[in-house]
Image (spheres, rainbow, N blue to C red):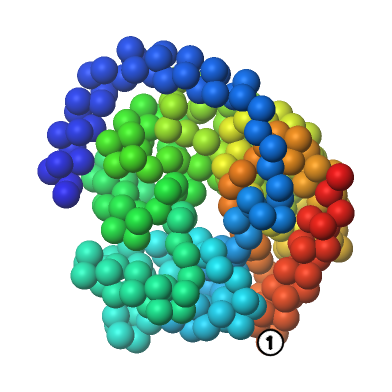
């Protein structure tokens, strides 16, 4: 698989300039199509497994099951559990990844994206995409290094997997700034956006403004809230209790014909675990979606 990926990547890089222009034109043509989205039916609501990062992968699936959610976004730095000697998912063999996929299927859950982290080498990103391909996802959520945009875009094209650019806060990530994200999207047809609504305020960015600015590019949302602005050390709070304007954001997403994944994600850890707050957030989300005009 890795040799195949490198060959495809080499071919993609050779023709990138020509193909990117053609694909960008096609994307522009598609964006003009009128689509009617029903958020209650068309938005794929689920949870990012980072929410349960204090327990291993099998136990996190039990918690998702208890919350009666269907879609999950695993990450490759999650402990795989005692069967795998507590190795992180990113260190497993393809046979190990296949076992995790079987665990997901046994719970009746769906995995259509995975959060990945590579380093400064192309080989590390090939390995992350190998895992993503084995899981059968549609896109990976990540923050690609600025000097690797071309190679990661081409790699994504070779694998047939989109890259949803995620945003951590100022000082940790370049992508806190929506202008940087827009630069990354230019000429990279396999790049899109995962909007993390609770991280933007830490850098002084209003999530509603960011969602508007990134219109047409958002394929996923991390549903998260925060109590204030301009403090990177601030921990998230239960959705609906902070400064994020969810009703307005949901209405804007519908206006944009957003038709993707919305994942609950908690960074904070409650003393009894995050399941109780997740249940609160499921109810809040369903209530708000039912009120979208």
Q: Quadrant of residue 236?
A: bottom right
* Quarter of the rendering occupied by the C terminus: top right
Residue shown at the point (83%, 49%) measured from the top left: 292
Q: Picture coordinates of residue 207 (x, y %)?
A: 76, 42
In depth, the one of 33 and 191 nearer the eye is: 33
What secondary structure is found at the residue carrying circle 1? loop
- Rendered position, 128 above or below 14: below
Q: Residue furthest left?
A: 3
- Rendered position, 6 above or below 60: above
What is the count of numbered marks? Answer: 1
In the picture of the structure, the residue carrying the numbered disc 1 is: 272
Q: Picture coordinates of residue 75 (x, y %)?
A: 45, 62
Q: Quick check: can you spot residue 63?
A: yes
Q: Quick check: 177 left or right of 59?
A: right
Q: Quick check: can you spot residue 55?
A: no
Q: Quick check: 131 left or right of 45?
A: left
Residue shown at the point (20%, 25%) measured from the top left: 11
């Amino acid at each position: 698989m890795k040799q195949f990926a490198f060959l495809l990547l080499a071919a993609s890089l050779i023709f990138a300039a020509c193909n990117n222009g053609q694909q960008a034109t096609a994307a522009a043509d598609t964006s003009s199509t009128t689509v009617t989205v029903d958020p209650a039916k068309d938005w794929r609501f689920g949870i990012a497994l980072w929410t349960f990062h204090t327990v291993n992968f099998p136990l996190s699936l039990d918690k998702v099951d208890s919350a009666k959610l269907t879609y999950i976004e695993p990450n490759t730095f999650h402990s795989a559990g005692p069967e795998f000697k507590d190795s992180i998912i990113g260190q497993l063999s393809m046979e190990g990844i296949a076992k995790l996929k079987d665990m997901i299927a046994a719970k009746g859950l769906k995995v259509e994206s995975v959060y990945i982290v590579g380093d400064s080498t192309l080989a590390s990103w090939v390995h992350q995409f190998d895992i993503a391909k084995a899981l059968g996802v549609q896109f990976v959520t990540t923050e690609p290094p600025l000097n690797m945009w071309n190679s990661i875009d081409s790699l994504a094209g070779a694998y047939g997997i989109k890259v949803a650019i995620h945003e951590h806060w100022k000082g940790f990530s370049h992508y806190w700034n929506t202008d940087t994200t827009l630069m990354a999207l230019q000429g990279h047809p396999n790049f899109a956006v995962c909007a993390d609504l609770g991280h933007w305020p830490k850098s002084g960015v209003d999530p509603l403004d960011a969602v508007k600015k990134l219109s047409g590019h958002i394929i996923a949302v991390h549903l998260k809230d925060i109590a204030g602005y301009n403090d990177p050390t601030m921990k998230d709070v239960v959705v609906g209790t902070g400064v994020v304007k969810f009703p307005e954001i949901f209405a804007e997403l519908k206006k944009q014909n957003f038709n993707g994944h919305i994942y609950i994600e908690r960074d904070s850890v409650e003393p009894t675990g995050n399941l109780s707050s997740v249940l609160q957030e499921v109810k809040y989300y369903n209530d708000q979606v039912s009120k979208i005009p």
